[in-house]
Image: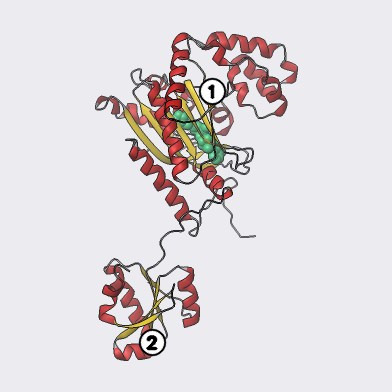
Amino acid sequence: MPKYAAPRGTNDVLPDESPKWEYVESKFRETCALYGYRELRTPTFEHTELFTRNLGETTDVVSKEMYTFNDRGGRSITLRPEGTAPAIRAYVQHNLGASLPLVKVYYIGRIFRYERPQAGRYREHTQLGVEAVGSMDPALDAEVISLAARFYRSVGLDEFELRLNSIGCPVCRPRYREALIKFARVRLDKLCPTCKTRAEQNPMRMFDCKVPECKAVLDDAPVLTGYLGEECAEHFELVRRYLEDLGIAYTLDGRLVRGFDYYTKTAFEFISGRLGAQNAIGGGGRYDNLVEEIGGSPTPAVGFGIGLERVMIALEEAEVELPVGLGLTAFVAATDEATHKLAVRLVFDLRNHGIAADTDYTGRSLKAQMKLADKLRAKYVVILGGDELRTSTVTVRDMSTSEQRIVPIAGLPSTLIGS
Ligand code: HAM
């Protein structure tokens, strides 16, 4: 066992793997740019109240999963457990809505939740998210959904299911809430202690429960779509029509409520059959009241968050080949101390010409250096031996064809440039 290991539920992305992550992130950036979303970077931690007041006190995230601590100044700080509240905090704080009628942002950020770690569920994960703030247009709901779907496809993830629901708004929800409470009251003995409390306090949160017995009970529960008011029903109908127009397939899921209280109207999740229990590769929805709750003027909004780690697992399971990154152009191999000095000078010179180059700093044999060059996926090995030193030439070996040629040292950069 090593002396230290990373905390449970966290991941290291090692150099052999990181090009794949970089690639997937770059595809997300590209897709966002294609849709007119610009990057927003917010801090990793925020004042605790931002989350406790705006995500819902009875949600799993707020009630038991936040990394909260007092800083040295005695202020309560929380490592962000999601990206929407921070994005909206920034939107309001910097008055972003003043210069644009619709503010479209994306982010790539670390998210922290004290959950029980398992495959695909971590205590620190990365979310690729977007938020579009400033319009009620159902076409915008369809736009963010289509952005997510296009991103998945752009990285080679073609098999996923889009689940869709509408969870109404504070106008239509009270009637539903009552129906749900009535339903739960006569089944309390079959519910877990948390759901018993939720049944009275915030009954929709019962749908977040992971206990199989509770899930079985809730299978027969009334669904919100039957209680939608006229405006929410029409909005939902239009979202569905736009999705159909765009050729985006979806399944209706009346039990999809999402894990935060801020959602209104559209709620959606992307599910991958490639993952185990933690099969949501992304989720989001509309939240028309959050901007006002965070202190801005009433502004409707919609967005999603995609779990990058889960996307990576799904890609691996689907055996999608991802780029392994650019290797070195040149590995300069020296054969003794005298040539090592020259090799060091040469790699610096190559780098000055913009050529990715490296050499050995550990005194390895030529054979070992050739192996190393291969591992670093160098295109060429530049060999510096005694003979070469005398004649001011180097041997350039093409690693893919094993062809070798002799080149004057002075001409090396121009030989390698563009190759
Ligand atoms: P969420 O559903 O809690 O939504 O998280 C979004 C995605 O992050 C999930 O679908 C999943 O892929 C990934 N994820 C969540 N928790 C974990 C975890 N413990 N380990 C690994 N991956 C995880 C939100 O956070 C909302 N803020 C999304 C949103 C943006 N809604 C509107 N705008």
Q: Which quadrant would residue 246 be assigned to in this image?
A: top left
Which label sits on residue 283?
A: none
Q: Left or right: 272 with respect to 51?
A: right
> What whole-number distance in Å separates the C-alpha atoms at marks 2 and 1?
70 Å
- Residue at which label 2 appears: 385
Mark count = 2
The C terminus appears in which quarter of the rendering?
bottom left
Return the x and y of residue 399 as percentages of the image width and height. Answer: 43, 74
The N terminus appears in which quarter of the rendering?
bottom right
Q: Left or right: 312 with respect to 109?
A: right
Of badges 2 and 1, the one in the foreground is: 2
Viewer-nearest residue: 206 or 135: 135
In the image, residue 201 above or below residue 365? above
Q: Which amino acid does label 1 sit on?
A: Glu
Q: Which label's residue is closer to the chain start, 2 or 1?
A: 1
Q: Which amino acid does label 2 sit on?
A: Gly
Q: Is mark 1 on a helix, strand or loop?
A: loop
Q: Is mark 2 on a helix, strand or loop?
A: loop
> Can residue 73 be seen in this snapshot?
no
Q: Left or right: 277 with respect to 28?
A: right
